Image (cartoon, grey):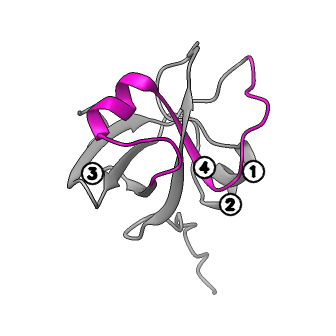
Amino acid sequence: MARKKKAVSPLQGEAAVFQVGIVLHVCCPGFHMLPETARTLGLKHGNYLQVEHEERGTRIVRELVSCNRGCPGMRKNYLYMDSESAHYLGTDLHDPVTVKLAEYEMDSP
């Protein structure tokens, strides 16, 4: 009898590179990305992501949220965050960052 393979997120043990987008008027604090991009990476609402800015040597962990209002103009290769998260990460708009699943499910600057 063949065993069914467990679906594993492409981000599990790996990382993806995104550019930073900023959400100025956040109704749902956390990270935002296009739903299709999240699905492609095997991510879902409520996953915690660790984002690293290699150039500055900083990292933060935030929850991936899906906004009820929607965010027009989002790009598939961007990870969107509120300005406070961007401040803690020490990043600017369009900076490249590395994204992976967080080891622990808790926000951390």
Q: Residue at x 43, y 56 (%)?
A: 99
- Mark 3, other Cα within 10 Å: few <14 / some 14–19 / many ≥20: few
Q: Secondary structure at mark 3?
A: loop
Report the Cα–Cα distance between label 4 and label 2.
Answer: 14 Å
Q: Is residue 34 above or below residue 106?
A: below
Residue ID for mark 4: 78
- Tell which circle, 4 or 3, labels the residue nearer the N-terminal end: 4
Residue hosting label 1: 36
Task: Work out how far the residue at label 2 is from the one at label 3, CA to CA, in angstroms.
Answer: 20 Å
Instruction: Name the spot of residue 63 as percent of width and height, x first.
Output: 43, 33
For the residues labelled 1 and 2, say whether their Cβ atoms are less than 8 Å apart: yes
In primary-sequence order, the first of circles 2 and 3 is: 2
Q: Are marks 1 and 4 in contact (CB under 8 Å)?
A: no
Write down the quadrant of residue 45 in the picture.
Answer: top right
N-term mark: 1 or 3: 1
Element carrying mark 4 = strand
